[in-house]
Amino acid sequence: MRKSFGTIAMTIALCGFASLAFAQTGSIQSKRLPVSALKNFTPRTAHSADPSFTAGRVKYSPNGTKITAATSLATTGLPGVDSLANWSDQFTDPGFDFNGNPQSVWPYTMVGTPPESGQSTTFRAPVVPVTVNLLAADGTVAVFNGQPLSFIPTPAIVSGMVKSPVFQSWFYTSGAGQFNDQQMRAEFANRVTGNGWHNLLAPVVRTPRTMNIPFGFWYFFTDVNNNPIAAAVDENTFGNLFFPPTSPVDNSTPIGAAELSHDITTKDISTFAFNNVYLYQGVIANCCVLGFHTYDFEPGNGENGIQAHLFVLNYSSWVSPGLFFFGFEDVTPLSHEMSELFNDPFVDNATPWYESVDPFLGSGLCQDNLETGDVIEVLTANPVAQVPMNERTYHPQNVALFPWFAGQSPSPAHLGAYSFPDETTLPALSPGNLMPGCVPGP
């Protein structure tokens, strides 16, 4: 089926080899930016207003039935859907829905089993390295300063991801374990008894894939020695080339190829790993998205009541040190996306409207969904944590905990916190009773 990104149309007129070569050289140079320019951009992940927020998924199954979370207390498994292990529940808090209508009951779905179950769930976690080639006007890989503009997640980068706290155990105030497992144990501390409830990732590196980005839809950044360091790709173009464009799925895209080869399945939590590849919306001034989580929707055949196959996944870029302000580097995007994926795997957990405003810059965000990383990525004070392990210091992002979205005061989470792993990053709730646009309600 057609995904939510628009199609790409590009016509190249060939006017002789010599003139084409001259145009290529000048055009490639015009797409170069100094790596210092990245400090003028705001590093972030995709938000609800971005095209990538709905990438690869639809709201309705082929028979017209809306896919929604179950609303009964602590149920296990979204009905009629072939996907990863999940459970649903609801919380009560007065607020307003997306259209400004009063709402007080908010259903949600998360990965694994309910906290009261005491059961652990281990998810296979494929890591698919994706090389991005920036193409010249003639369709070949562009070259700058004698170096091909290919951004490859090398074995060292992939190993760095796999050895990070996202996939490996470390010590937090809530206990020892993987980053997202301990986050969930912290936010549901009042519902967990004993040490039996965990949500664990079992990483496995899969076949590398490749994306070729047409000329005119990319920029690149170089260091002081003119070495290419990072790439920026148009967000719509990226989506069209990342997700399978049709159903049945073909192997022309990284996700489609991974699905057909069974490198990823509907039961997995899949990561597509990139090397310093960021996204911009329309113009380069709207850079830089470092990651997003979503699912690829493929229709079912109705057998056994299955109406949809949902491949839950994330795009996350490895970030080299020193490129952005506020400590965003290495696995900051991956930790952010995994946190949100655990808490909102089907990207439909609506919440009361909330705002998160940086006290120093005055900027922030206004949203109405359970996106745990977005709340803190806009803050300049303490947005990332530091985790020294496996011969390096990692920088996972501090994230908001479930009680913050549910408006629970005092917080029933571990240590009465609203954030993890640094409990001081988010000291208070958002103002309540907000209408769309975070306008105070009546």
Image (cartoon, rainbow, N blue to C red):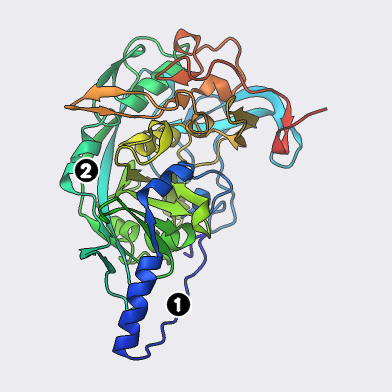
Question: Which residue of the protein is positioned furthest toward the front in this rendering?
Answer: 224
Q: Position of residue 192 (x, y in %)?
A: 41, 13
Of the 4 image quadrants, the one containing the C terminus is top right
Residue closest to the eye, 167 or 440 = 440
Q: Residue at x 29, y 41 (%)?
A: 320
Question: Which residue of the protein is positioned furthest toward the bottom in this rendering?
Answer: 16
Q: Is residue 164 left or right of residue 215?
A: left
Q: Residue at x 24, y 22 (%)?
A: 388
Q: Which residue is mark 1?
A: 10
Distance between the Cα atoms at labels 2 and 1? 33 Å
Residue 354 versus residue 131 in the image, above or below: above
Q: Nearer the N terminus, badge 2 or badge 1?
A: 1
Q: Residues within 10 Å of mark 2 (few under 14, many from 20)?
A: some
Badge 2 amino acid: Ile
Q: Is residue 257 left or right of residue 359?
A: left
Residue closest to the eye, 330 or 64 = 330
Residue 157 bears which disc, if any?
2
Residue closest to the eye, 122 or 316 = 316
